[in-house]
Image (cartoon, rainbow, N blue to C red):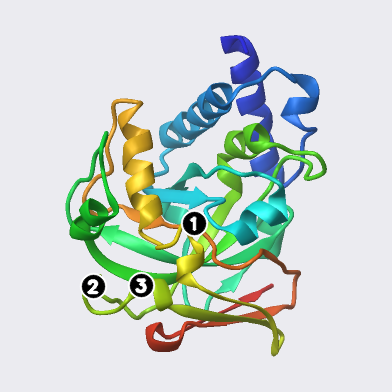
Amino acid sequence: MSADQVAQIAEELAEADRTHGVIPRITARYPDATVEDSYAIQGVWRDKNLAAGRTIVGRKIGLTSKAMQQATGITEPDYGVMFDDTVYESGADIPVAHFSNVRIEVELAFVLARPLEGPDCTLEDAMAAIDYAVPALEVLNSHIELEGRTIVDTISDNAAYGAMVLGSVRKRPDEIDLRWVPALLSKNGEIEETGVAAGVLGHPATGVAWLANKFHQHGARLEAGEIILAGSFTRPMWVSAGDSVRADYGPMGVIECRFV
């Protein structure tokens, strides 16, 4: 895609974000668009937001589990940025009208104690760089029509990130076997999804190492203090206004929120 085409799509997505709307699939209009094109679109969109005064607090990794890959038909991970005004605490009321195609995913988030960079970052390197893990729900926010979308569409749309809801229980990586963190995801009192964190690439911190290596390809690194949302270990759950959501992570506590 040309620089002008990239800029045009980024502006369409920015407008869709403002109006909570949906745009036609990018890959329907530009069938030869590449993953590199999609990250270029995301980058222009990100820079527009930074210029408007928003602050990046971390990164989300998506499509890291078989459950998510089967749910989307997309078979490789992706990533996006998370801004400071998208972070909620457990118990929050979340305005559903602020998002499009609203779904919830069950994840773990990691806060880095020190920078992490590739090109040969391993799971062990990632674990050594992590300050603590905390349970999190991700609110998906898709501004591109869902039918027929590819990873190019998803990446362009900031990997469908909308918001996250953080729990209060923090665990150092050596305090708990992160692979076995469970989740029971309920909507309005009914369990809809269950899973364990090992569903994310065999270990939920594997994605942190993957992201550090991806960033190295662009001459960047993950910084101390950043929150890394590591990917869902359940399928996405649709939510609407009036729904109450509860995720029970066993030894890592409970997250609750309500969509209004």
* Disc 3 target residue: 178
* Disc 2 target residue: 172
Chain-order first, disc 2 or disc 3: 2
Q: Nearer the viewer, residue 36 or 46?
A: 36
**Which amino acid is tagged 3?**
Leu
Q: Quadrant of residue 108?
A: bottom left
Q: Secondary structure at mark 3?
A: helix
Q: Position of residue 101 (x, y in %)?
A: 74, 55
Mark-to-mark CA distance, 2 and 1: 24 Å
Where, quadrant-wise, is the C terminus in this rendering? bottom right
The residue positioned 73% from the left and 69% from the top of the image is 239
Mark 2 touches mark 1? (CB < 8 Å): no
The answer to whether residue 140 is visible is: no
Mark-to-mark CA distance, 2 and 3: 10 Å
The answer to whether residue 24 is visible is: yes
Mark-to-mark CA distance, 3 and 1: 25 Å
Q: In the image as oriented, which residue stretches furthest toward the front?
A: 202
Vertical order, 42 against 247 (above or below): above
